[in-house]
Image (cartoon, helix red, strand yellow):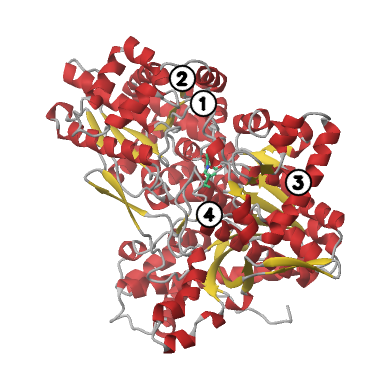
């Protein structure tokens, strides 16, 4: 644009080294001789970032010229992972960087270890958002991710006497070289206050305002010039908030209290991943994200478009679960109150602009907000929600006359026991498409929690099965298997077309390929350094939740221990690895963590288990650790109660890295099994319908306790306090309630584990199954997921960016 030519940065090692040195001097203000490792890291990051920023400039120019239809992804969470390795790979400068660093006397691995990961998410939902952004850029789709730049990310997990202890995660303490602050795009966000009608228009006068300052990170595409962005908002006090009078009077705390109050909005990520904390600050965070992002989206629309009628055709906004659903009444407010559009026109634009992804089936995870809290914080939005509700219920009454129960169930307002706004109902009502994240999940959504809405608007519901980025979770995490795959296929094009993995299937007949495949897995286990690399590495890594049933894996461990103590043990040597955090207020999950560490201490200390059974639980499971554990795994534990795990994405990452799955017919496990073949999947347990029947019938967990000696022994040893008196409440809740049918699935699970042992003993058979798991799970690429979103929901097209 305006004929300004961008000088392109050289890609040669010499050019890279030259830039690294000049950045060290001019941007870091130090010299090679006196530079610290942190200096080297920051300078390296800037030098790599510059090369991506050059592509970003070209991308922005191409997008401006194309005036395309945009995909905007609104998410309260992003688990982007460490940025350095990714940006070295995507900029093609990994080798040049290593040579330049060594030439300057820096140790590349020491420098890379300084790369912190922005832990701006809890688990599956946050990581999916990051994988989708990676695929959108790789597929040249004009897209922006919007989120919150929390000062403190997901807590750091430490174990003290086996108990989880949470430590604040001040991830940007050293600053973040990858982000671009953009203070000139600040937005003003209002809260509280009141509304009045002036000249037929409603005016909201907020009681307080804060500023939203954006900074963005680059989201490079793989194997293409496109570089999109993710824009993260940080709350700041409006300059007027510092109270000089109070300061002069020595009331220092009071002088800054408004500023602190404002900044608190983006201070910390809420560490819950199932039960909403229901705190007003969380609601403030959600509106803060929505208000800043919609204003920025409208600003961008106006750069190239003048007619509101074009807004929906130029803008597809995806709501990542209910957390950003206030965007629906907020856009109505902007269009009706600020832009003066009439209600119906505004409503049709809003509905055509938004789409909603639901990520859960747990009733307690579906957010509702107290009417009085929402009405106090956002008075105009509550009015708009009431108006939307009135129209909805008119439609319901017209379609299902005299069905008061249905009206009560579908209302956006829950009346009993307290008046609450149902965010999932608002999400379905105010969007064009609602999708689940796996076939079973979408089917259950439309037949249970959202059944009424499916009855009213069946075509609004569509399934889009999750996926994962093969660049992050195969190429970056597992360079050894990536090299072997490229060698086996004779190309590395599989990295942008994962369906090519199917070309590996015939290689199961090639004994040398099988042996190289085994060597890679063993090398990855050795690199992980947890347990004997020759042992079967049995991995369960995910957030702790009783529906995911880490407690079932633990009962299996205790059963194996008992079998070893009993003598004549014929199981294969096994290392059982747990990884994952529990929400700080989720005591049942924290008790399970405590018990796992107590059992591990006992099993690992007992010489009887040497060479047979080891239990490891590395603390602080995050993307960085996942990238080390997943390539090393032989067995993937996906053992949730059927009908509870919406999809799972760890299951996909582990299969793609050649781990075999033991699992239930839940979430995406079903689709993984359908693709890898029943012979290459260890299935067990009740399916969703059977589980629901048992759960809603008179399920008595004690019957299983009474009927199964090994189960009884495992529960008794816990209840007896044999593991340092830890975990008795875990055993008690399994015997009394067992909400997630752990005891009902125990026998089927433990017996299937014996089949795992049998398969492992035949290493050629195991390796064949492992190669077939990788070969047949190309479908679970987030590129395929994005292609499905484009076909069924977003309808956006790629814009070519010249290299
Ligand atoms: C309000 C508290 C809260 C916060 C986060 C959530 C998320 C929806 C929980 C989550 O991460 N769900 C997971 O999303 C993944 C991506 O779609 C799925 O693969 C997992 O099955 C699902 O548990 C629920 C409730």
CB under 8 Å between discs 2 and 1: yes
Locate residue 537 relative to residue 392 in the image: left or right: left
Density class for disc 1 (Cα within 10 Å; few <14, some 14-19, many ≥20) is many
Mark 2 to mark 1 CA distance (whole Å): 8 Å
Locate residue 658 relative to residue 355 in the image: left or right: left
The residue at which mark 2 appears reads as 685
When asked about the image quadrant of residue 610, the answer is: top left
The residue at which mark 1 appears reads as 642
Mark 4 to mark 2 CA distance (whole Å): 33 Å
The residue at which mark 3 appears reads as 389
Q: Position of residue 361 (x, y in %)?
A: 57, 35
Q: Nearer the viewer, mark 3 or mark 2?
A: 3
Density class for disc 2 (Cα within 10 Å; few <14, some 14-19, many ≥20) is many
Q: Position of residue 414 (x, y in %)?
A: 65, 41
Density class for disc 3 (Cα within 10 Å; few <14, some 14-19, many ≥20) is some
Density class for disc 4 (Cα within 10 Å; few <14, some 14-19, many ≥20) is many
Front in this rendered view, residue 540 or 36: 540
When asked about the image quadrant of residue 715, the answer is: top left
The residue at which mark 4 appears reads as 77
Front in this rendered view, residue 112 or 512: 112
Asked if residue 161 shows in the view, the reply is yes
Q: Secondary structure at mark 4?
A: loop
Residue furthest to the left in view is 607
Q: Within 8 Å: ligand 1 and the Cβ of disc 4?
A: yes
Q: Residue at x 56, y 66 (%)?
A: 233
Front in this rendered view, residue 220 or 699: 699
């Amino acid at each position: 644009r305006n004929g300004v030519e961008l000088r392109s940065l050289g890609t040669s090692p010499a050019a890279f080294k030259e830039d690294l040195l000049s950045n060290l001097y001019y941007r870091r203000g130090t010299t090679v001789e006196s530079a610290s490792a942190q200096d080297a890291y920051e300078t390296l990051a800037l030098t790599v970032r510059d090369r991506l920023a050059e592509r970003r400039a070209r991308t922005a120019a191409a997008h401006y010229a194309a005036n395309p239809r945009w995909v905007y992804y609104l998410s309260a969470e992003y688990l982007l992972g460490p940025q350095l390795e990714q940006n070295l790979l995507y900029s093609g400068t990994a080798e040049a960087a290593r040579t330049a660093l060594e030439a300057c006397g820096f140790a590349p691995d020491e420098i890379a270890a300084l790369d912190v990961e922005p832990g701006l998410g809890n688990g599956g939902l946050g990581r999916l958002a990051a994988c989708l952004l990676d695929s959108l850029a790789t597929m040249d789709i004009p897209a922006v991710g919007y989120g919150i730049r929390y000062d403190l990310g997901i807590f750091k997990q430490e174990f003290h006497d086996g108990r989880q202890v949470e430590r604040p995660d001040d991830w940007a303490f050293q600053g973040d070289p990858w982000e671009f602050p953009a203070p000139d795009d600040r937005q003003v966000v209002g809260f509280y206050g009141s509304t009045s009608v002036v000249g037929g228009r409603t005016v909201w006068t907020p009681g307080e305002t804060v500023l939203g300052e954006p900074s963005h990170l680059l989201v490079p595409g793989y194997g293409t010039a496109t570089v999109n962005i993710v824009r993260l908002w940080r709350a700041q006090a409006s300059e007027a908030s510092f109270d000089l009078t109070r300061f002069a009077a020595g009331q220092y705390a009071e002088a800054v209290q408004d500023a602190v109050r404002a900044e608190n909005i983006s201070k910390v990520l809420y560490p819950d991943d199932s039960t909403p904390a229901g705190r007003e600050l969380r609601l403030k965070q959600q509106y803060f994200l929505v208000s800043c992002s919609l204003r920025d989206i409208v600003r961008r629309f106006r750069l190239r478009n003048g007619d509101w009628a074009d807004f929906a055709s130029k803008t597809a906004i995806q709501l990542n679960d209910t957390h950003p659903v206030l965007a629906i009444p907020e856009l109505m407010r902007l269009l009706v109150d600020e832009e003066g559009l009439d209600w119906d026109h505004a409503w049709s634009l809003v509905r055509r602009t938004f789409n909603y992804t639901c990520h859960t089936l747990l009733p307690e995870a579906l957010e509702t907000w107290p009417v009085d809290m929402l009405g106090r914080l956002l008075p105009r939005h509550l009015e708009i929600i009431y108006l939307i509700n009135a129209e909805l219920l008119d439609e319901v009454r017209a379609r299902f006359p005299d069905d008061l129960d249905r009206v009560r169930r579908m209302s956006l307002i829950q009346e009993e026991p307290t008046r609450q706004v149902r965010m999932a109902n608002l999400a379905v009502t105010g969007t064009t498409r609602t999708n689940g994240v796996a076939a079973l999940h979408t089917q259950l959504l439309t037949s249970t929690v959202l059944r009424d809405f499916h009855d009213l608007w069946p075509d609004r519901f569509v399934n889009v099965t999750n996926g994962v980025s093969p660049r992050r979770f195969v190429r970056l995490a597992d360079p050894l298997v990536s090299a072997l795959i490229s060698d086996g296929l004779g190309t590395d094009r599989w990295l942008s077309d994962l369906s090519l993995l199917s070309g590996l299937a015939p290689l199961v007949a090639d004994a040398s390929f099988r042996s190289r495949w085994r060597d890679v897995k063993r090398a990855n286990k050795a690199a992980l350094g947890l347990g004997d690399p020759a042992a079967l590495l049995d991995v369960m890594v995910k957030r702790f939740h009783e529906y995911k049933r880490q407690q079932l894996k633990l009962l299996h461990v205790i059963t194996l221990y008992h079998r070893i103590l009993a003598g004549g043990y014929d199981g294969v040597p096994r290392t059982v690895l747990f990884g994952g955090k529990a929400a700080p207020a989720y005591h049942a999950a924290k008790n399970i963590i405590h018990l796992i560490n107590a059992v591990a201490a006992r099993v690992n200390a007992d010489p009887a288990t040497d060479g047979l059974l080891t239990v490891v639980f590395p603390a602080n499971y995050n993307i960085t650790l996942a990238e080390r554990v997943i390539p090393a795994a032989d067995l993937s534990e996906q053992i949730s109660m059927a009908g509870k795990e919406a999809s799972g994405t760890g299951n996909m990452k582990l299969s793609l890295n050649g781990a075999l799955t033991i699992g239930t017919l839940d979430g995406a496990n079903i689709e993984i099994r359908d693709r890898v073949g029943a012979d290459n999947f260890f299935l067990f347990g009740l399916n969703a319908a059977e589980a629901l029947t048992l759960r809603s019938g008179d399920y008595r967990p004690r019957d299983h306790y009474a009927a199964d000696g090994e189960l009884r022994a495992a529960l008794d040893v816990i209840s007896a306090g044999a593991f340092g008196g830890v975990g008795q409440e875990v055993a008690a809740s399994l015997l009394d309630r067992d909400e997630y049918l752990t005891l009902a699935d125990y026998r089927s699970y433990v017996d299937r584990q014996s089949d795992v042992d049998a398969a492992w003993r035949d290493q050629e058979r195991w390796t064949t199954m492992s190669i077939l798991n990788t070969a047949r799970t190309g479908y679970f690429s987030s590129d395929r997921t994005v292609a499905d979103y484009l076909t069924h929901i977003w309808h956006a097209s790629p814009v070519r960016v010249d290299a």
